[in-house]
Image: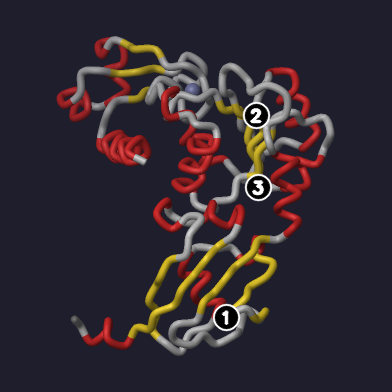
Amino acid sequence: MTLENNTKKCFIFRFYAELNDFLPEHRKQKSFVEYFKTPITLNDVLVSLGIPFSEVDLVLVNGISVQMNHKLKENDRIAVYPKFESLDITSVTNLREKPLRDTKFILDCHLGKLAKYLRMLGFDSFYQNQIGDEEIIEIAAKEGRVILTRDKLLLKSIKITHGYFVRAITKHEQLKEVVRKFDLYKQFESFTRCMSCNEKLKTIDKASIIGRIGPDIARIFNQFYHCPNCDKIYWKGSHFKRMEGFIRELVKE
Ligand SMILES: [Zn+2]
């Protein structure tokens, strides 16, 4: 054992209700042990475990309510409860009526990167960086799209039938969250849609675009895809390999 391990102290955690959304599978809905170097505050451990404060309402340490700056001691039992406001939001965001048959999305202005990732997996994902709430709600209703948003207020409109508040901050985690929430695993059609504009891609002859791709790319790759809407050309280069690895990881989950 290294010196570092020796200085770490044991803490027992239990997260309740939707706070489990922020935990990895093996830690959900149960008590688990984690080790931290001391001195350490409640604030520090929640950051380290990836729990956003905005979702936390109440923390009991050994049964007693404490503040975020509370210093933890070895073997403390830490129970963390979500905000009631978030619980209300859950009922607001639960899919009402019937689920939509094709899963199509419309994303708010904070979720541009997530839109690109969903398109990468082949999902029809409407996104414009300057679009108002009213317009989002209107397009969603007209085109049968699920609204994905980081804005809880947006989802309070009674006109919304299908909406979801995305909790994760990073694009990778957001994609995982949405894929999990809507159980999209069997609907992937990766690399069939333009990541820039959402249009379906078509294969294109190398000869017809040779002047646009440069000799090196032309030498290495044979398959090319073209977006008929924004004229972008795609091929399966290193960027593709990286994304493919990430998708494989997603599917494994
Ligand atoms: Zn395009």
Residue at which label 3 appears? 150
Q: Secondary structure at mark 3?
A: loop
Mark 1 and mark 2: Cα distance apart in space:
42 Å
Q: Are marks 2 and 3 in contact (CB under 8 Å)?
A: no
Total numbered badges shown on the rendered structure: 3
The correct choice, above or below, for 132 with respect to 13 in the image is: above
Q: Mark 3 packing: few (<14 Cα in 10 Å), some, or many (20+)?
A: some
Q: Earlier in the sequence, mark 1 or mark 2?
A: 1
Disc 2 residue type (three-letter): Val
Disc 3 residue type (three-letter): Arg
Residue at which label 2 appears? 146
Q: Mark 2 packing: few (<14 Cα in 10 Å), some, or many (20+)?
A: many
Mark 1 and mark 3: Cα distance apart in space:
34 Å
- Choose between 12 and 239: the one closer to the eye: 12
Residue at which label 1 appears? 62
Q: Position of residue 44 (x, y in %)?
A: 51, 77
Name the residue located 72 percent from the left edge and 29 percent from the top edge.
96
Asked if residue 129 can be seen in this view, the reply is no
Q: Mark 1 packing: few (<14 Cα in 10 Å), some, or many (20+)?
A: few
Callout in the foreground (1, 2): 1
- Choose between 96 and 195: the one closer to the eye: 96
* Image quadrant assignment for residue 33: bottom left
> Is disc 3's CB within 8 Å of ligand 1?
no
Q: Position of residue 151 (x, y in %)?
A: 71, 47
> Is disc 2's CB within 8 Å of ligand 1?
no
Q: Position of residue 230 (x, y in %)?
A: 50, 21
Asked if residue 200 can be seen in this view, the reply is yes
